[in-house]
């Protein structure tokens, strides 16, 4: 699947996500078919930062499955996410 902006649906702005951003980690809701390398490449191209790690979280429930990516940036890099 080619890396495109549809893979990242939107950043998650919650109390926990904001606390993670203080440590250089950002949480995004992503497409279920996306993989780590696609998310890394897309975040680097979109936000002009260096990604050092991507962790994927899958949440399965009765109505729908959700997939999140926790993206860790190089020290000093930041993403400005407006709520």
Image (cartoon, rainbow, N blue to C red):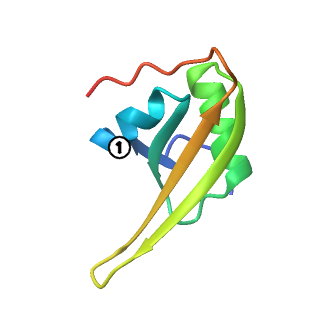
Left or right of 8, for residue 66: left
Quadrant for the N terminus, please. Answer: bottom right
Whether residue 14 appears in this view of the structure is no
* Front residue of 11 and 53: 53
Residue beneath the point at 36% across and 33% down: 18
What residue is rendered at 63% in x and 18% in y? 48
Quadrant of the frame with the C terminus: top left
Asked if residue 27 is positioned above or below residue 83 in the image, the reply reads below
Q: Which residue is mark 1?
A: 16
- x 38%, y 40%: residue: 17
> With respect to residue 36, does 79 lie above or below?
above
Q: Is residue 60 left or right of residue 40?
A: left
Q: How many marks?
A: 1
Residue 12 in percent (x, y) is at 36, 43
**Residue at 29% over, 85% down:** 62
Q: Where on the picture, by quarter, is residue 39?
A: top right
Density class for disc 1 (Cα within 10 Å; few <14, some 14-19, many ≥20) is: few
- Residue 77 position, x and y percent, is 61, 17
Counting from the top left corner in percent of width and height, residue 31 is at 49, 58
Name the residue nearer the viewer: 41 or 4. 41
Would you identify the image quadrant in which residue 64 lies? bottom left
């Amino acid at each position: 699947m080619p890396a495109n902006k549809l893979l990242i649906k939107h950043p998650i702005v919650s109390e926990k996500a904001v606390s993670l951003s203080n440590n250089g980690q950002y949480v995004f809701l992503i497409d279920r078919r996306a993989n780590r390398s696609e998310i890394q490449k897309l975040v680097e191209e979109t936000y002009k930062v260096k990604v050092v790690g991507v962790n994927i979280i899958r949440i399965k429930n009765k109505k729908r499955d959700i997939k999140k990516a926790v993206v860790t940036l190089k020290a000093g890099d930041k993403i400005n996410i407006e709520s």
